[in-house]
Image: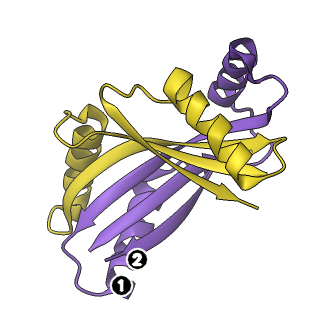
Chain colours: A yellow, B purple
Amino acid sequence: MKAIVNVALKQGVLDDQGKATHHALDTLGFKDVVKDVRIGKQIILELNSTTESEAREEVVKMCEKLLANTVIEDYDIEIVG
Amino acid sequence: MKAIVNVALKQGVLDDQGKATHHALDTLGFKDVVKDVRIGKQIILELNSTTESEAREEVVKMCEKLLANTVIEDYDIEIVG
């Protein structure tokens, strides 16, 4: 079973990497196209779990313990396959 | 219009960050649960484009010029809203 975890900074938390990327896109000629850029992580996990609920439960634990810093980041879990 | 770009290392390219995370999860007690971990970037763009095809075309250009290193990374574009 496969889990896709998207970790993004919470709204209101300064996204340095996004700001720098936005600036770089502006200088590359996309100034009129791009309004905002935010950058997060996508973590793809291959799991031994056999059921979706079991997989989700384990992944929530991983997020809370390691994958996300819940003070400043939100996470979103999708179980596939 | 909003675009979500997922950038991931190509299969076969060593994913240091994924390996380190896998190891950390193992030591946290998820050794029997996790088979593999890969880590990529998720870039969320707010665009001024009015049509989906126009948005996609611009985002492909951004990926080729800046957002992805196409020698070692694959990207995947989803246009939403």
Confirm whether circles 2 and 1 share one chain: yes
Q: Is residue A10 left or right of residue B52?
A: left
Chain of residue at mark 2: B
Residue name at image x 40 percent, y 78 percent: B57
- Give the residue type at disc 2: Arg
Question: Of helix, strand and loop, which one carries label 1?
Answer: helix
* Category of crowding for the residue at label 1, using alpha-carbon neighbours closer than 10 angstroms: few (below 14), some (14–19), many (at least 20): some
Residue name at image x 20 percent, y 55 percent: A36
User: Percent from the top left, x then y, of residue A75?
Assistant: 44, 42
Chain of residue at mark 1: B
Q: Is residue A50 left or right of residue B80?
A: right
User: Percent from the top left, x then y, of residue A42?
Assistant: 53, 44
* Category of crowding for the residue at label 2, using alpha-carbon neighbours closer than 10 angstroms: few (below 14), some (14–19), many (at least 20): some
Q: Which residue is mark 1?
A: B52
User: Percent from the top left, x then y, of residue B8?
Assistant: 60, 48
- Give the residue type at disc 1: Glu
| Residue A48 visible at all | yes
| Residue B66 visible at all | no
Quadrant the N terminus of chain B occupies? bottom left
Q: Is residue A64 left or right of residue B24?
A: left
User: Percent from the top left, x then y, of residue B61?
Assistant: 41, 67
Q: Out of B22 and B16, give the one closest to the viewer.
A: B22
Q: Quadrant of residue B19?
A: top right
Labels 2 & 1 near each other (Cβ < 8 A): yes
Question: Of helix, strand and loop, which one carries label 2?
Answer: helix
Residue name at image x 20 percent, y 34 percent: A13
Q: Out of A35 and B31, give the one closest to the viewer.
A: B31
Question: Which label number is shown at residue B78?
Answer: none
Q: Which residue is mark 2?
A: B56
Q: Out of A58 and A45, give the one closest to the viewer.
A: A58
Residue name at image x 75 percent, y 18 percent: B26
